[in-house]
Amino acid sequence: MKKGILWTIQILLAALFLFAGGMKLAAPAAELAKQVPLSVGFIRFIGAAEILGALALVVPGWMKKWRGLTFYGALGLAIIMVGATALTVADGGIVAGLFPGVAAILCLLVMDGHRRVR
């Protein structure tokens, strides 16, 4: 995959996960409990993991240091999105699960693009 396309995917995923993770950390507990059948503490943990994963997608490349972290950040985000896809499909059907599924696939593409850096 070309470097420019890979960077574009990483930046878009980082923006997505910074927003999603920030919302999970900032939203009131009652609102989170209504949205997902998971504990509020676990949802907040996922939010923190999404923010750290988002940072791992872009910061090592910008700093030109610890570039192997991008692979592991994408791996962690892919794992989160596979779980999100399963929960979404179980609750809202296959069409509803397309968005987290595509995000998981994009995370796997980033992992593939960085597999030689580790």
Image (cartoon, rainbow, N blue to C red):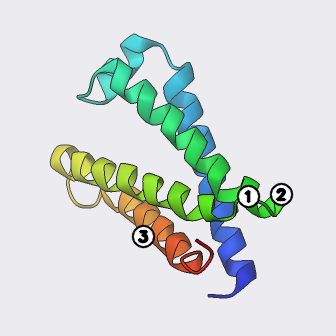
Provide residue 37's location: percent of width, then percent of height: 23, 28
Q: Residue at x 54, y 77 (%)?
A: 115
Quarter of the rendering occupied by the N terminus: bottom right
Cα distance in 3D space between marks 1 and 3: 21 Å
**Circle 3 crowding by C-alpha within 10 Å: few under 14, some 14–19, many from 20:** some
Cα distance in 3D space between marks 2 and 1: 5 Å
**Outermost residue toward the left in this view:** 90
Judge from the rendering whether residue 1 lies leftward or rightward of residue 111; answer left or right: right
**Of the residues tagged 2 and 3, which is closer to the observer?**
2
Q: Name the residue that disc number 3 marks.
A: 105
Q: Residue at x 75, y 80 (%)?
A: 4
Cα distance in 3D space between marks 2 and 3: 26 Å
Helix, strand or loop status at disc 3: helix
Proximity of marks 2 and 1: CB atoms separated by less than 8 Å? yes
Proximity of marks 2 and 3: CB atoms separated by less than 8 Å? no
Q: Name the residue that disc number 2 marks.
A: 63
- Does residue 88 lie above or below 71 as drawn? above
Helix, strand or loop status at disc 1: helix
Provide residue 56's location: percent of width, then percent of height: 63, 52
- Does residue 25 lie above or below 64 as drawn? above
Q: Earlier in the sequence, mark 1 or mark 3?
A: 1
Mark sitting on residue 60:
1
| Residue type of the residue flagged with mark 1 | Pro
Judge from the rendering whether residue 87 lies leftward or rightward of residue 58; answer left or right: left
Quarter of the rendering occupied by the C terminus: bottom right
Q: Residue at x 43, y 35 (%)?
A: 46
